[in-house]
Image (cartoon, helix red, strand yellow):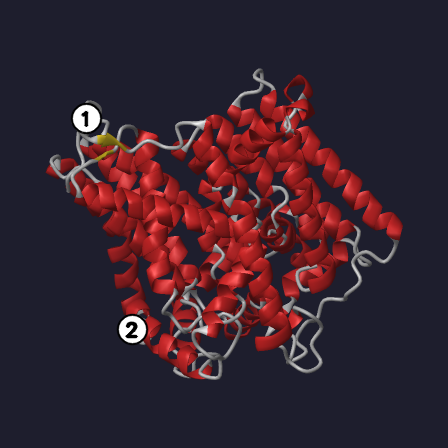
Amino acid sequence: MNIGNSNNRIKLCFLENKSKFLKLFFLIPLGVTITAIAYFLLTQIFYYFPGGVGGKEVFLTPRYLLQQNDLPSGIFQQWRQLILVIFTGVAFIFTALNLSRNKKITFGKFLFFIYILAISLEFMFVLLTPNGWGHLALQAKSINNGIWLSLQVINETIHLRHLDFVDTMRYIYIDLGGNTCGYTLPGTTHPPGIFLVSIAIFTLATHIFRFLHNPALAWAITMTLTNTLLIVIVSLIAREAFSTRIAKLTAISLLTVPSVLMHFCALLDAIASLFTATGILIMLNALKYFRLDTFSRNRTKSLLMGMFSGLFFMLCIQMTYGHIVPISALILTFIVLVDKKDFKNLSMFMLGMSMLALMYFSFEYWISNGTSFWFKRAFRLAKIVGDGLAWRPYPLSQVANFVILSVMGGILFLPCIIFMSGYTFSSLWRLIRGRLYISNTRALCRFSLSFSVILILSYLIFQKTVRLEVERTLHWFFVFIWSMSGIFLVAIDVFCREIFPGMFIRNRNWGLFIFLLLQFVITLTLAMGIQDYY
């Protein structure tokens, strides 16, 4: 691969002047326009079902049509509650922007404050529902976290049968994980390992919050506290790819994104996204380590980095079979970009990454007698699910999937995909012409994330096995996009300062403030209209 140090090559630089930021800004209205038109066409024409209410049939099919939503509607029943949410949200956004400008606050402390603000916003939504904390417990037991029902069945079976550890594992991997019909209990279309992860979280939750005397509420609170850590990890990835300033803006923007406020409360899928994000962060550091850190390499460190990345990748693929897609994209990108000259240390890294996978797959094959072997079952269930969703017209179904992701991922989701696609293809064109030069670690991270997204998109466009609940099943895809979205916040700031210089008194980011308020209003509208996660 013709990437190296040469004074004659064009530097893989990034948005070096204001004109490029201004051009980047106009991708935002373009993305919003495309999303709005596509959403209208899907909800009102192509995917409109009799009896549906504008948009629900897209977001909630088949749960909505099957009347499987067991959460009570009517979050904000009084104007007083809605006004309280708006003023609190405005105060939180304003506070976060002020904290980002305070140079005395370290990046670590800033992320801690953002985490607290995010938790406060999420719990504020819950507390304003008719049932308060009871509503949060209901979420944990609802169809959105159907794994809860499976946990109760598993615990009851273990108790009634007096199963020891080996028999419990065989029950999970053979009786539940070895089914051939695809679906028996919620979670049985997932790898059997999801039950082990869920049991671990449930056990931790019931021990920490034992004083609540409500296992469902303890589970929900634990999930919320854990899921919100995703904001911290995404911000760390953004700092690796850009700068501390952009990482701070990324963290603030996530406070207003629908998928954060509406999914982080008791949603198991966000845990998988946390595993994915942690794996991305480790892989980016490994990539820098092998390409640019030539003096401090040693076999022990290489092995440990590989083991940690392998650990989180193994946790990812226990959640859904679809998580093999981002993992494969990350590994392939790493292989393409890594410096292969240091073969010994690179071999130790790859050994560490594959070690846990080999151990787990060997255990899985042995304990299940081969009935629920991960790869074998993945292909079988993909065919079952694909056949069951043959009624969905392709490729219209894929358009619907990306519209849902664009709405739930925030205003910057689609513009960021457009930018990352252009960024990757322009870099590849430079590579073909022999004029590509990755100048620093951040450029390397940006290219790695963008290239991974292209690989993922090349698969998602043609796959036919994902339901319309992609805001949950493809939640991991948000991680890649959110990590790169911070550059658009800088573009908004640059545009507003150029067009409305009088608005910026005492260095206030009023353009960003207005944009974040707009995103927050959209999130409120979705929360009031969908009534599925609240």
Left/right placement of residue 385 relative to residue 534 reads left
Residue on which the image places disc 1: 294
Three-letter amino acid code at the position of disc 1? Thr
Residue on which the image places disc 2: 376
Three-letter amino acid code at the position of disc 2? Lys
Left/right placement of residue 271 relative to residue 191 reads right
* Location of residue 231 (image quadrant): top right
Q: Residue at x 41, y 78 (%)?
A: 386
In the rendered image, the quadrant that contains the N terminus is top left
Q: Is residue 312 visible?
A: yes
* Location of residue 394 (image quadrant): bottom left
Q: Nearer the viewer, residue 474 or 489?
A: 489
Count neighbours of disc 2 (C-alpha within 10 A) and say few if under 14, some if 14 to 19, many if 20 or more: few
Discs 1/2, front: 1
Residue 470: x, y in percent? 51, 64
- Helix, strand or loop at disc 1? loop
Q: Residue at x 38, y 76 (%)?
A: 381
In the rendered image, the quadrant that contains the C terminus is bottom right
Count neighbours of disc 1 (C-alpha within 10 A) and say few if under 14, some if 14 to 19, many if 20 or more: few
Residue 149: x, y in percent? 59, 70
How many numbered dots are placed on residues in this image?
Answer: 2
Dot 1 or dot 2: first in sequence order is: 1
Examine the rendered structure and indicate whether residue 126 appears above or below residue 433.
below
Picture disc at residue 366: none
Q: Is residue 202 visible?
A: no
Examine the rendered structure and indicate whether residue 356 appears above or below residue 399.
above
